[in-house]
Image (cartoon, rainbow, N blue to C red):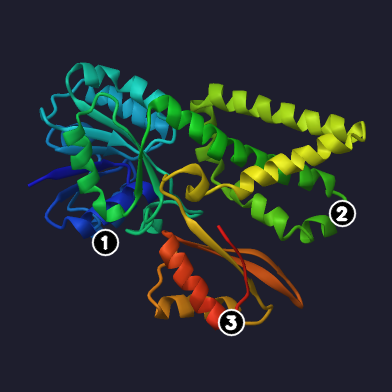
């Protein structure tokens, strides 16, 4: 019987356990956590078969070890594992948000011949802790794999174990991963937080300002609600690349500021034209066959039950949603609802269904 140890039973660790249990009920799951209340919850709700606080003892008998804590804890776990006698064919993997730091810490294990596969599921929730875990948390999310020196057979074994997550696998190097997330995740979180903080300062003497913050402002700053402790750790662990991206972003802002000051109409227009062209060309049709999401944008009336009507129609047609996002709702004016699907076929079926119900499709991405 395969024994899987998950160290860290927070949102990600718990959700992985539930997904593994759903797909592989015969796998023996061992959950390790330093918090007694978390262990008690895992035991009471049968999320895992066994719970422990003794990471070292549990690791020595595991066939797969999943390190599901913050990067600082993951690197400490890897140092501990390098001092233990592990099963010869054990697979060690993690869910850390930066990969160069983790793979550097894994070198002593790799030098012993232990298989280490870096991992990072690009999924989460505004909720935290074991009680927020759910088996479908990762469905249709990107899951980065950083195999390093791991043989393909081990990578396949890990993917088979995690088949219940229903993720989109992407194999990258540590540098590729950290560069991607620095630009596409870390920088946007900083920009969103900075914009919210700057807006708060701007309207400190005018409460009406923040009350009016809606529509586009709320859409582009949604991620500013992320967990501060987690994001402090993330930024510190990818500091070099993030500061590089921040400087490039500040340079771009400086250029558009200068163009505005100089009333440089061609430069200002080019600024927005370049952005529009790039944004409008995002997607697999233009950028290749990278697993992607497919969006519908539709007008919804400002009426009670409008959004529920859309989701009920999709559910009755058994069309599975990946995400739903209200872009803008204003009194007496139609709002825009973004609904996201895992593939183009489902999106197109949804479009036909909703158009038949007299919903106006604004655009498809």
Which residue carries the number 2 mark?
206
Which labelled disc corresponds to residue 23? none
Does residue 283 appear to the left or right of 277 in the view shown?
left
CA distance for labels 1 and 3: 34 Å
Does residue 326 appear to the left or right of 319 in the view shown?
right
Please name the residue shown 47% across and 29% down the image. Answer: 178
Q: Secondary structure at mark 1?
A: loop
Residue closer to the observer: 363 or 96: 363
Which residue carries the number 1 mark?
45
Q: Position of residue 126 (x, y in %)?
A: 51, 54
Does residue 18 appear to the left or right of 313 in the view shown?
left
Q: Earlier in the sequence, mark 1 or mark 2?
A: 1
Which residue carries the number 3 mark?
305
Q: Earlier in the sequence, mark 2 or mark 3?
A: 2
Q: Secondary structure at mark 2?
A: loop
Does residue 285 appear to the left or right of 266 in the view shown?
left
Image height of 216 relative to 354, above or below: above
Task: Please name which of the two marks, 1 or 2, marks the residue nearer to the observer.
Answer: 2
- Local crowd size for mark 1, using a 10 Å CA cut-off: few (<14), some (14–19), many (≥20): few
Residue farthest to the front? 286
Residue closer to the observer: 95 or 146: 146
Task: Please name which of the two marks, 2 or 3, marks the residue nearer to the observer.
Answer: 3
Q: Secondary structure at mark 3?
A: loop
């Amino acid at each position: 019987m395969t024994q899987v140890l998950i160290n860290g039973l927070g949102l990600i660790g718990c959700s992985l356990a539930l997904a593994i249990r759903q797909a592989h009920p015969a796998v023996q799951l061992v959950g390790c956590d330093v918090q007694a209340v978390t262990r008690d919850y895992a035991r009471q709700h049968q999320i895992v078969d066994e719970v422990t606080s003794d990471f070292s003892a549990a690791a020595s008998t595991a066939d797969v070890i999943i390190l599901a804590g913050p990067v600082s804890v993951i690197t400490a776990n890897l140092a501990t594992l390098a001092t233990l006698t592990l099963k010869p064919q054990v697979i060690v993997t993690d869910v850390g948000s930066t990969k160069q730091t983790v793979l550097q810490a894994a070198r002593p294990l790799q030098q012993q011949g232990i298989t280490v596969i870096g991992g990072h599921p690009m999924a989460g929730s505004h909720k935290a802790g074991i009680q927020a875990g759910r088996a479908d948390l990762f469905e249709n999310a990107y899951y980065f794999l950083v195999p390093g020196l791991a043989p393909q057979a081990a990578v396949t074994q890990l993917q088979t174990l995690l088949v219940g997550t229903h993720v989109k696998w992407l194999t990258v190097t540590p540098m590729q991963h950290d560069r991607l997330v620095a630009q596409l995740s870390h920088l946007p979180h900083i920009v969103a937080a900075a914009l919210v903080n700057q807006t708060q300062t701007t309207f400190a003497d005018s409460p009406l300002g923040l009350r009016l913050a809606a529509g586009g402002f709320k859409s582009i700053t949604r991620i500013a609600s992320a967990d501060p402790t987690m994001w402090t750790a993330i930024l510190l662990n990818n500091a070099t690349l993030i500061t590089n991206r921040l400087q490039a972003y500040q340079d771009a802002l400086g250029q558009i500021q200068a163009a505005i000051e100089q009333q440089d109409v061609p430069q200002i227009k080019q600024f927005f034209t370049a952005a529009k062209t790039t944004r409008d060309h995002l997607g697999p049709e233009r950028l290749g066959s990278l697993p992607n999401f497919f969006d519908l944008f539709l007008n919804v009336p400002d009426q009670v039950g409008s959004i529920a009507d859309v989701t009920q129609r999709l559910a009755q047609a058994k069309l599975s949603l990946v995400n739903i996002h209200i872009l803008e709702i204003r009194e007496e004016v139609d709002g825009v609802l973004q609904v996201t699907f895992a593939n183009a076929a489902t999106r197109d079926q949804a479009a036909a269904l909703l158009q038949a119900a007299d919903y106006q499709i604004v655009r498809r991405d």
